[in-house]
Amino acid sequence: MKPLIELHNVHKNYVMGKSIVRALRGLSLKITEDEFVAMVGASGSGKSTAMHLMGCLDTPSHGKVIFEGKDILNLSSNELATIRRERIGFVFQTFNLMNTMSALDNVLLPTVFKNDDVNYEKRARDLLKEVGLSHRIAHKPSELSGGERQRIAIARSLINDPEVVFADEPTGNLDSVTGRKVMNFLKRVNKVRKKTIVIVTHDLELAKEADRIIKLKDGVRL
Amino acid sequence: MITAAFKISLNSIRQQRVRSWLTMLGIFIGIASVTTFISLGDAVNNSVQEMFEMIGGNKLIIMPGAGGILGAFMGGESTLTIDDVKMLERLGSINSVTYYVMGNSLATVRNEHESVWVMGIPSEKGSDIFTQMQGMDIVRGRNIDETEKYTAVVGYLLWSGNEIFSRPVRLRDTITVDEKDFEVVGLLSKVGTRQDDTSILIPFETASDIYNKDGKLDFIMAEVSPGFEIEKVSEIIKNRLAREHDVKKGEEDFSLQTSENIINMVGGIILLIQLVFVGVAMISMVVGGIGIMNTMYTSVIERTKQIGVMKAVGAKDSQILTIFLVESGIYGLVGGLVGGLMGYGFAKLMELGIQSEGGSVFSLSVTFSPGLILGVLLFSFVVGVVSGLLPARQASKMNPVDALRYE
Ligand SMILES: Nc1ncnc2c1ncn2[C@@H]1O[C@H](COP(=O)(O)OP(=O)(O)OP(=O)(O)O)[C@@H](O)[C@H]1O
Ligand SMILES: [Mg+2]
């Protein structure tokens, strides 16, 4: 299996006035295609930071982040945006949907930034159907439950048929039953659609269902 | 992408209706004033242009007082006499000469009293010289005869409708001015300027008596003979008149202008007034632009999280920039559209106001100019986009992770 993402001795420092927060302190890891990986660790251990770097949302202070063979430090912000749009899907703990848009428009949002004339509406409707929200297509996020919002976010992450989906505590704001459903759906995406999945979770029961667990502590692997 | 940008921007504008309208207030006012002043100025220009087109370009106009066309409205004792006319008639460079005295009187027709302009016109050499040089036509009846003292020819608005007299004046009607009865012998065609169209023409001597003019004239018009250069003739006559009036150069008690001069002068004055007012309106546009900028900065901060989301799903910096520029451009465009229509409506209202003001000299007609509206829209759109430039840049440069973390 090809390595999809590699982190080599990655450091990430946040400068806050005079103090420096060292969120990652020499983290190395590999994510292979079609894997289902769970990242666990205490709060503040650097899980989200690592995920943002793997997802090309941010760049490392030191070390290398290689995405599909390319060092992201060598890529322009436009190239990184294109990678995020075409190769990556994100699911967040707080959903991060556009609250003025309908469920359908939210799912379509990533296609807005493509430069093609393809109509993705059918695909978006199919995805909403797949996550069981056919009857909520015209609703705004504020009219939906947490579980429903997260399912919209998952549909959105898949609209551009990415290679990898990053989910940062996707069940963190959901009750255990709803969280269970979301987890099952992500597993199905991994198995059926052959997408690489990286999730961050505090729920060790859920983490155990992953192919592999990466443990972080104070910005390095445990 | 651009349609989606519109959708996103409109969403955001609709989200804060009151704030959006307030944002556009400065643009409304600025564009409304610009449109009003330009439309009105153009209308005045057109009406002056029309007035002189009727007269033609080879005319010299002599008026009492140094102020010329402006001084004529200020009144004062006239200094022009029949002797001046005789001097002009003797010149080979002058083809024909005419003149008038003028006053404003209450005229009575069938017990109805209305204010009209009265012009005393020369008739001993044929009153047709006057009407022709003024660009007037007699559509019915005849002109004033040289032997007559109490006949009148009436302007278009007096006989064509009920705007001045509720029952239109007809041929052979009697018009009473200053206790003297005049028989209407002719009806004038439409000239297009309000003063001419609400005038009564009567014989010179009679009018001179009524207004106690003592042989003095309010206006002389001379046509330059073919083959002579109007500017040169004008210069020669100016010197001759100054000598005969015994005044120094630069201290003339009359003003002499070519018809073309007057058009240019009036055009120049109007342009200047337009520029001053448009300049003042620009202040409003600057304020409007700052208003848009302020709203856009607020909007960018409020939507930080949305910006983060859009970047996370693959929006490029330039695309974020576009979304916010479209938003500020919409503010400019809508502001310009509403302001432009308001300004046009305002100019139209003023036109109606001037129209109903009976004794006014000009009849204005404000025309809807698509060019002006387009220009104004383009301008306000540019103001909107330029005002949004800095806030939109700030939005586009946001670090996606920081934007996503923003609460
Ligand atoms: N933008 C930032 N500015 C300053 N400090 C930051 C920033 N982002 C993260 N940090 C700090 O970096 C460290 C790692 O943060 P990170 O969010 O990666 O942790 P985490 O493992 O995801 O924690 P949690 O489980 O609570 O989400 C924390 O100490 C955090 O305060
Ligand atoms: Mg985190």
Image (cartoon, rainbow, N blue to C red):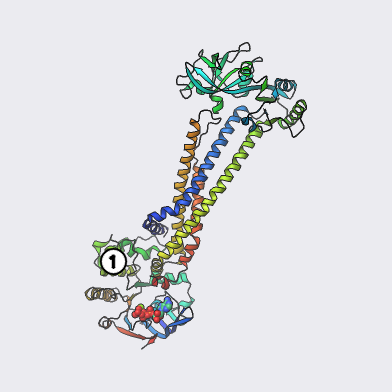
| Quadrant of the image occupied by residue A2 | bottom left
The residue singled out by tag 1 in the image is A127
Q: Mark 1: give few (<14), some (14-19) or many (20+) Cα within 10 Å.
A: many
At x 54% / y 36%, what residue is drawn?
Answer: B43
Q: Where residue B127 appears, x then y in whole percent? A: 62, 17
Q: What residue occupies the far left of the structure in this picture?
A: A177
Residue B100, given in percent of the width and then of the height, sits at 64, 22
Q: Residue at 48%, 30% (x, y): give it.
A: B356
Position of residue A72 in the picture relative to residue A98 (left or right): right
Against B263, is B291 above or below? below
Outermost residue on the top side: it is B147
Quarter of the picture holding the C terminus of chain B: bottom left
Does A10 sit above or below residue A110? below
Residue A141, horizontal then vertical, whole percent: 30, 64
B166 relative to B37, above or below: above
Q: Residue at x 58, y 19 (%)?
A: B201
* Host chain of mark 1: A
Taking the image as drawn, is residue A4 in sight?
no
Q: Position of residue B242 (x, y in %)?
A: 75, 29
Q: Quadrant of residue A68?
A: bottom left
Mark 1, ligand 2, within 8 Å: the answer is no
Query: Is there any visible trace of residue A20 in the rendered image?
Result: yes
- The amino acid type found where label 1 is placed reads Leu
